[in-house]
Image (spheres, rainbow, N blue to C red):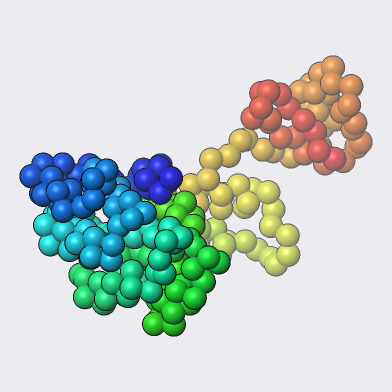
Amino acid sequence: MLTDALSKGGLNVPKLEGEVAEELKAQLFPGAAVGNPIDILATGTPEHLRLCIDYCEEKLDNIDAMMAIFGTPGLVTMFEMYDVLHEKMQTCKKPIFPILPSINTAGAEVSAFLAKGHVNFADEVTLGTALSRIVNAPKPAVPEIELFGVDVPRIRRIIDSIPEDGYIAPNYVQALLHAAGIPLVDEFVSDALRFGRYFCGGAERCVFRFGSTFLRRSLLNDSFAACL
């Protein structure tokens, strides 16, 4: 499940094969697997765990990090196994992520491991998903404001030319938006009632009144609507 979560997140889980992989497999119990993930079986010993970590650290150059999943098989206590994990986390250059799922049946061992200053990821899929999201997180945005397509001098001139405070006339709004590089539809103000009727045609919901009638062209159906 961890391999699936990492692969789904775009991380490479390389297949281990060749002379070095076969050399490692020969030192484990029959039935163990080294194709990645490495499986030392429930009967694997602390020395088997140490051996696998040493191979990943020193001989397998295509491995950048290790995730050690080790719950209790119910045969022995896990103190010695977790001591090996603690030792290797202190000395290895490649990061090791401990995944200790037996937080109840091996609660004492997990507590002793955490007391040494470590953390525990009890669920492998959650760790794989979280790590994938961190690796794929975009880089922080640059602190500088990017003004692509914004004509700053023209915007300043338009603002300085506005004669009074308060609401800005529609023509100034249009000019500012054009200067900022924002695509717009054509807008205008009409006092002619017939002008509104001409564009709205047979639209039964168009309601008119005398005075300024604001017309806006729709981008969805290429029609005109009247805003009163």
Q: Residue at x 39, y 69 (%)?
A: 78
Q: Quadrant of the C terminus?
A: top right
Q: Nearer the viewer, residue 127 or 122?
A: 122
Q: Residue at x 63, y 51 (%)?
A: 173
Above-or-below relation of 103 to 14: below
For residue 84, which quarter of the picture? bottom left
For residue 185, which quarter of the picture? top right
Q: Residue at x 8, y 44 (%)?
A: 19
Q: Quadrant of the N terminus?
A: top left
At which x and y percent is residue 85? 31, 70
Q: Residue furthest top?
A: 202
Q: Nearer the viewer, residue 10 or 222?
A: 10
Can the viewer see residue 48 in this picture? Answer: yes
At which x and y percent is residue 31? 27, 43
Can the viewer see residue 36 in this picture? Answer: no
At which x and y percent is residue 14? 24, 44
Q: Nearer the viewer, residue 203 or 98?
A: 98
Q: Residue at x 81, y 18 (%)?
A: 201
At which x and y percent is residue 18? 11, 42
Locate residue 56 relative to residue 107 in the image: left or right.
Answer: left
Above-or-below relation of 119 to 167: below
